[in-house]
Image (cartoon, rainbow, N blue to C red):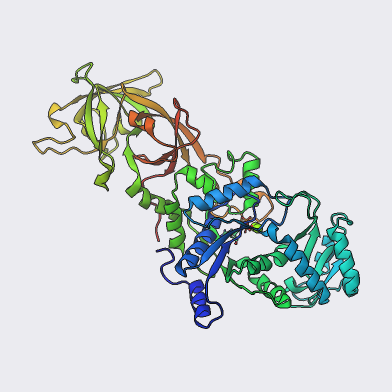
Amino acid sequence: EFLEASNFIEEIITEDLKNGKFNYVQTRFPPEPNGYLHIGHAKAIVINFEIAKKFDGKCNLRFDDTNPTKENLDYINSIIEDVKWLGYDFGDKVYYASDYFGQMYELAIALIKQGKAYVCHQSPEEIRLLRGTLTQPGIKSPYRSRSIEENLELFEKMKNGEFEEGECVLRAKIDMSHPNLNMRDPVMYRIIKTPHHRTEDKWCIYPTYDWAHGLEDSIEKVTHSLCTLEFEDHRVLYDWFLDQLGVFHPRQIEFARLNITHTVLSKRKLLYLAQNNYVNGWDDPRMPTIKGLRRRGFTSDIIKDFIQKIGVTKSNSTIDYALLDHCAREELNKKAKRAMVVQDPIKLIIENYPEDKIDYVEASNNPEDNSFGKRLVSFSKELFIERSDFAIEPPKGFRRLFVGQEVRLVFAYYVVCTGYEKDDNGNVTTVWCTYDPNSKGGWTSDGRKVKGTIHWVNAKDCTDVELRMYDKLFLKENPEETDERNDFIANLNPNSLIIKDAKAEKSLLEAKDFENFQFLRLGYFCKDIDSAQDHIIFNKTVDLKDSYSK
Ligand code: ATP
Ligand code: MG
Ligand code: MG
């Protein structure tokens, strides 16, 4: 179903199968466990798993755990949870780059023996400076001409911990004047003396991305290694390593990275927001992380639909955040149960309604889908309605309550407004009305029409709830515009979270964590995991109105 229209990646794969380059298809999703997954990762997950499915192949979940200073087990577990939550099956086995450290070490020795790698004592700074530029060739390291024997000996010493961090690296010996800077003797191993979350202190040399990634793909017999466009310039190096070693050679294909307006998609920046309390952690509902989106009320179907709608292309672009909201609305309109909540309550008292009577009216759980059934909502003389549904001096065309105006209380009765009361500050506290006993259900047999319909809850039988209303995390469309390291912080929206104490119908006491609702006229909400039995919290997912335009 997904990625239905054939995209350029599928065309390449189809061609590779037809001409016999490969006779099966295997992909992988290779996160580094140094943070939580965000919606950009969801794009890579959907592409890799859906393509494998389409070609009857498999997709590995592989942790690219090659830097112990930034990685940990919490991240690993949360990534596994998120991939599963998105609905993808990666089989019984999770793969780890760290399981291949031994093989990678042997292959590095093979490369040294071919005279194509050397131990270099230049500092990272020197290496960078001497690499040259696009218009200037690099300068060869004085250590480049070492003998194979000396390199073998030094590399073994590196592995055995006989050098300190930063003292030396292993570099590939390629071409210091290559037009592609990545080919100018790239670093393959650096020394890191931090224990690794899986291999502990077995290793103190760690492979760089360029050296490790192709080998990981090759060892797992991945046929198509799909990655984002920033790696296009690294493909020649990816190919070079595999060619020198003569091992199984996957094909790297690059696609456009996902960018979304009004947010940042970088683990480093998201980590910065969480660690400095600009948000309440990784799973804050304002965060574009999978965990944040989930807590906000997004379902895996919404996320997959979004990824499917943006498609797979080879040119970078920034997607309007409103498209994500649009996908949420479309799905939740079909899937969310309806309920009534009053977010800014004032009392409505029905003068001619019996004092102690509690009645029940029937309410549809989802007018889009009869299988949701109906529920009974309690009704009495005293209700809560929205402050904004009453006006002392109504603007022209006001369709809600003002003295003399008749409206429908949804599912219940017609009422005519008869008066109101204010407190000392001039704020309306109570609105008075009379009801038509013959309008139960919200209709009359005389067919008279009312101007508007408003929602309500029974003041004698309701529950207090907290509503958390979210807005964009960043004011600017592109908060990263300035590119200074943490300048994006200056663009944070100071009003991205507003909390309201609301009155809700009692049925919401039974809501389950993450359950989605449409609160009539207010928007889509879902129950937050921080709720307590006597303090239920709902996060606003998105409002009802669609601002997305193509
Ligand atoms: P970040 O820059 O947020 O730290 P990353 O690319 O370093 O992300 P990895 O864990 O290395 O994160 O990524 C795992 C996979 O997800 C990679 O194949 C990467 O290309 C892909 N990916 C990461 N971010 C995006 C994005 N915004 N859009 C599409 N794919 C992405
Ligand atoms: Mg990375
Ligand atoms: Mg990155």
State which quadrant residue 511 falls in.
top left
The N terminus: image quadrant: bottom left
Q: Residue at x 37, y 32 (%)?
A: 510
Looking at the image, which residue is at 72% across and 73% down?
241
User: Which of the four quarters of the rendered structure image does ligand 1 lie in?
Assistant: bottom right
Q: Is residue 40 left or right of residue 445?
A: right
Where is residue 21 drawn, in percent x and y? 56, 80
In the current view of this chain or complex, which residue is farthest to the top?
355
Q: Quadrant of the C terminus?
A: bottom left
Q: Where does the image place residue 268, in percent across and percent down from the top left?
A: 65, 51
Between 349 and 358, the one lying in front of the other is 358
Q: Position of residue 441 (x, y in %)?
A: 18, 34
Q: As drawn, is 202 to the left or to the right of 152?
A: left
Horizontal placement of 423 versus 469: left or right?
Answer: left
Q: Is residue 1 above or below residue 486?
A: below
Residue 454 appears in the picture as rendered: yes
Is 413 placed left or right of 504 in the picture? Answer: left
Q: Is residue 132 visible?
A: no
Question: Which residue extends farthest bottom?
Answer: 19
Q: Quadrant of residue 464?
A: top left
